[in-house]
Image (tube, rainbow, N blue to C red):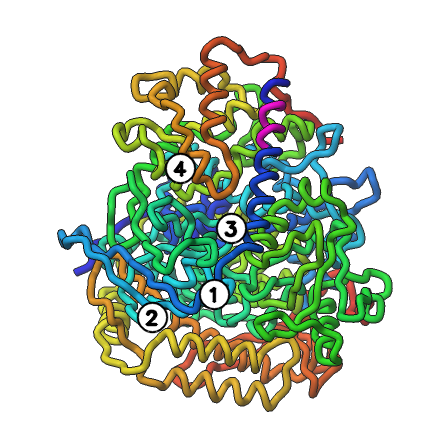
């Protein structure tokens, strides 16, 4: 029988949201015994790759104001954001910027010593707080280093969580595999927070790390929790070829131009006021139109693309404020952005959807919260603004950390773990996957899946493609691919990959099902067969539950507190 | 402080020159159809005798060593144990010895390497787990021993909602910024000849982090940070081989950090007035 490890609080995932939650919980109660369990080592989570900024209103005396940040966020969401949630983000953010500053964050500064901010897409004021172009990296470092101050935070590096243990609707813990030894263990705790990030690796051309697979989303989904608004997938305008590595929106914030093969700044046709700094869904659609209408370039790999030109920003500026971008361009594209434009193309970047939570990050399971990209508290609605995701991780990391800590203090001992659930989970992963005898190469299945998502559920969608995509994904699920060739216990990444692929297939299905059902165009979800937003029928969130057959889909209302929907123009 | 800034400026210049060589290298890169990938295989827990396995890899123009390894793992032998994640040199997972030199696999293009054979081995100075994967526990412990966080007795930096700011000029930030770009990939630790003979020596990564916090005007530990590295297994064990700085993929210069720390221990004392105070931001 699997060993049991007990804690008061288990945080799954060690990215920005997870680390922020850990500090918040640890400083709420110093007697609380907190576990941070993650499939990667600390500081390897994909939060380190966030580049451009973290949005917050800190210069009210210079004309910024919180109402404007709230409105920009709601407008950016195409009015699908829960407005009370947007308000909570905006009101909490200034504190988070200074809190990080107190903990050692190397924010870029003005000459007078104050924290600086830069322009970002979709905002009415330059309010992206930045640290060169390595914001996520420095935030992660600041939070990780600060975690080391607390003796009651215990890191479990490279432990892969496989399922949630529950008693009716109460959280009890998780099952996990320690990668180094291969041992299967139970974690027991009255409270948990899922901070496992997004699922962008279900697409082929993606900014995400290889580790950004939907393990956490799928754990919740399998435990009977709803996934919400999964059809809303953000395509960032500027991923380099062929790797998909991100060029930050900060590059446009600093004044970079997008150009087509006529050398034209084409955004003036699509967003005459904001140009390159319209919201990401608008810019990415404009780019696809340019490409479809024959004004794109051909990358040497055969893929159509456009270019971003930074050369007019000047060598000094680029070296100071976009050093990381220059490094990426030189290394991964062979182009020095100081000298020439670099080829880019819209790229899968963020999932607005996730585990259905309320405004405080609470899931439908008592004792379980979710924060960061894994959660869908409906902050971003149908389209997220740049620099609002690192903000989200900080705010809801703090909120859920505090709430989970208080809950754990009030519910000190977990009475029982269902042995039945543990045995079922062992059967699922060991009999169903590890010892299964499939013939098809799981890595081929993964490639077919991600290529299908690129082809059928990209920026522009239609009923025929989505139906074909669903059919294809269901077909892939049925294939005899489940098996692990590596029979060793120790550090078996083949086994981990197979579990990841299993979760990717279920998650891809619900993205497609949500997109199929939503017969309108809103935010990042653009249907060529339903090109208009339809507030009468679809001003509501998609909810999906797992069943033994197809996902069970329903709807959930949007919270309005301040702004009625209107047409978006940039 | 001025001297430090001068040194950092010199370093920036050096890095820029390095960038230019990088660009020139890109233009002079070699192209091949196929390479042979030699992969170190062993499961230390099972007391395996190490062996080298060869894989034939079809090369594409932008292929990195990580791409080649993942091609082998996906289509030739899925049991290769390897640690990787971001594929853009930010996360620090995929450090290994490539043709004998510690490098990040995702940041090493096939076209940069000479010859038709590429040999991948686990990092030195780390306990081995399996194939290309090593154990980082001791390395992370050394980092933690440096108390790598802001300590400030005169400022309330607890996790409470407060609007207050330590002012830092861009120059104040420059004093520690380059050292804070450490991604904890372990390449410097693997290359360090002192770590190879003394595992109690904190190593270049940890020592450069000690300097990073020492040089931050928000921190008030001052001499206590210096004393912490001034022991028998401490900073004097470094004999300035400089290999740490040579292998760093992010242009951090741990050897410079160590020299600066030594300088402060030898006699410069920190001007206590320089320690920043929390103020109302406006």
Give the CA distance from mark 2 to mark 3.
Answer: 26 Å
Mark 1 residue element: loop
Expressed as whole percent of the image width and height from the top left, the position of residue A347 reads: 60, 67
Rendered position, A306 above or below B232: below
Work out whether residue A307 or residue A175 is closer to the camera in this orientation and state it: A307
Q: Are marks 1 and 3 on the same chain?
A: yes
Identify residue for label 3.
Answer: A17
Residue A34 magenta? no
Mark 2 residue element: helix
Residue B8 magenta? yes
Q: Nearer the viewer, mark 4 or mark 3?
A: 4
* Residue B188: mark in rendering: 4
Left or right: A334 as drawn, with respect to B192: right
Give the CA distance from mark 4 to mark 1.
Answer: 46 Å
Q: Nearer the viewer, mark 2 or mark 4?
A: 4
* Residue A498: mark in rendering: 2
Label 2 chain ID: A
Identify residue for label 1.
Answer: A364
Q: Are marks 1 and 2 on the same chain?
A: yes
Give the CA distance from mark 1 to mark 3.
Answer: 19 Å
Work out whether residue A562 or residue A240 is closer to the camera in this orientation and state it: A240
Q: Which residues are magenta?
A: B5-11
Residue A307, quarter of picture: bottom right
Q: Work out whether mark 1 precedes mark 3 in sequence or the reverse, and give the earlier one.
A: 3
């Amino acid at each position: 029988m699997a060993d049991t490890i007990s804690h008061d609080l288990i945080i799954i995932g060690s990215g920005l949201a997870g680390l922020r939650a850990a500090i918040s919980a640890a400083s709420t109660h110093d007697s609380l015994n907190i576990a941070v369990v993650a499939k990667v080592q600390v500081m390897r989570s994909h939060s380190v790759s966030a580049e451009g900024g973290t949005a917050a209103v800190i210069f009210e005396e210079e004309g910024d104001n919180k109402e404007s940040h709230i409105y920009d966020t709601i407008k950016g969401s195409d009015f699908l954001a829960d407005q009370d949630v947007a308000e909570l983000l905006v009101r909490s953010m200034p504190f988070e910027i200074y809190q990080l500053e107190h903990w050692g964050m190397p924010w870029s500064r003005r000459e007078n010593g104050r924290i600086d901010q830069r322009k970002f897409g979709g905002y009415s004021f330059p309010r992206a707080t930045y640290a060169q172009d390595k914001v996520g990296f420095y935030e992660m470092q600041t939070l990780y280093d600060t975690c080391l101050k607390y003796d009651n935070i215990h890191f479990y590096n490279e432990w892969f969580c496989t399922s949630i243990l529950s008693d009716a609707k109460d959280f009890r813990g998780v099952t996990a595999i320690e990668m180094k030894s291969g041992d299967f263990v139970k974690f027991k705790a009255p409270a948990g927070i899922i901070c496992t990030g997004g699922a962008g690796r279900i697409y082929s051309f993606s900014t995400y790390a290889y580790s950004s697979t939907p393990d956490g989303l799928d754990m919740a989904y399998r435990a009977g929790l709803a996934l919400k608004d999964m059809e809303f997938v953000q395509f960032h305008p500027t991923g380099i070829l062929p790797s998909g590595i991100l060029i930050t929106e900060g590059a446009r914030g600093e004044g970079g131009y997008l150009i087509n093969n006529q050398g034209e700044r084409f955004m003036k046709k699509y967003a005459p006021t904001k140009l390159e700094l319209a919201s990401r869904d608008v810019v990415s659609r404009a780019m696809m139109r340019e490409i479809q209408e024959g004004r794109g370039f051909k990358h040497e790999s055969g893929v159509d693309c456009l270019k971003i030109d930074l050369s007019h920003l000047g060598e000094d500026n680029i070296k100071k404020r976009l050093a990381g971008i220059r490094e990426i361009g030189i290394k991964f594209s062979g182009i020095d952005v100081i000298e020439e434009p670099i080829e880019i193309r819209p790229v899968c970047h963020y999932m607005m959807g996730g585990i259905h939570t309320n405004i405080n990050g609470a899931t439908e399971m008592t004792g379980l919260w979710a924060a960061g990209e894994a959660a869908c508290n409906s902050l971003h609605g149908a389209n997220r603004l740049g620099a609002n995701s690192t903000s989200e991780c900080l705010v809801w990391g703090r909120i859920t950390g505090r709430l989970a800590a208080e809950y754990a203090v009030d519910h000190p001992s977990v009475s029982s773990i269902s042995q039945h659930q543990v045995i079922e989970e062992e059967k699922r992963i060991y009999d169903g996957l590890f010892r299964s005898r499939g013939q098809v190469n799981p890595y081929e299945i993964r490639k077919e899946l991600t290529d299908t998502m690129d082809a059928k559920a990209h920026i522009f969608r239609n009923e025929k493609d989505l139906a074909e995509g669903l059919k294809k994904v269901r077909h892939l699920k049925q294939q005899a691919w489940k098996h692990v060739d590596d029979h060793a216990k120790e550090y078996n990444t083949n086994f981990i990959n197979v579990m990841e692929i299993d979760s990717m297939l279920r998650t891809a299905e619900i993205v497609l099902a949500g997109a199929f059902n939503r017969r309108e165009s809103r935010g990042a979800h653009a249907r060529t067969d339903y090109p208009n937003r339809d507030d009468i029928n679809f001003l509501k969130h998609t909810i999906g539950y797992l069943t033994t057959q197809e996902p069970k889909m329903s709807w959930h209302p949007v919270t309005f507190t301040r702004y009625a929907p209107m047409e978006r123009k940039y | 402080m001025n001297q430090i800034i001068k040194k950092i400026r010199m370093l920036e210049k050096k890095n820029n020159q390095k960038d230019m060589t990088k660009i020139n290298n890109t233009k002079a890169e070699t192209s091949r159809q196929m390479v042979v990938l030699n992969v170190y295989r062993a499961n230390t827990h099972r007391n395996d005798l190490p062996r080298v396995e060869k894989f034939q890899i079809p090369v594409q123009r932008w292929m990195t060593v990580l791409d080649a390894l993942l091609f082998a793992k996906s289509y030739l032998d899925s049991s290769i144990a390897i640690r990787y994640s971001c594929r853009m040199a930010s996360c620090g997972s995929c450090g290994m010895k490539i043709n004998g030199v510690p490098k990040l696999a995702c940041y090493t293009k096939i076209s940069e390497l000479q010859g038709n054979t590429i040999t991948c081995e686990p990092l030195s100075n780390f306990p081995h787990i399996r194939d290309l994967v090593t154990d980082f526990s001791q390395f992370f412990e050394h980092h933690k021993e440096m108390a790598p966080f802001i300590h400030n007795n005169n400022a309330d930096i607890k996790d409470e909602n407060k609007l207050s700011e330590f002012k830092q000029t861009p120059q104040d930030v420059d004093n520690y910024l380059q050292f804070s770009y450490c991604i904890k990939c372990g390449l410097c630790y693997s290359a360090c000849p002192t770590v190879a003979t003394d595992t109690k020596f904190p190593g270049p990564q940890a020592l450069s982090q000690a300097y990073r916090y020492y040089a931050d005007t928000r921190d008030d530990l001052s001499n206590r940070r210096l004393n912490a590295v001034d022991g028998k297994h401490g900073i004097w064990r470094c004999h300035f081989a400089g290999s740490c700085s040579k292998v760093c993929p992010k242009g951090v210069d741990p050897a410079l950090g160590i020299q600066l720390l030594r300088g402060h221990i030898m006699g410069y004392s920190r001007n206590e007035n320089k320690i920043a105070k929390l103020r109302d931001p406006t």
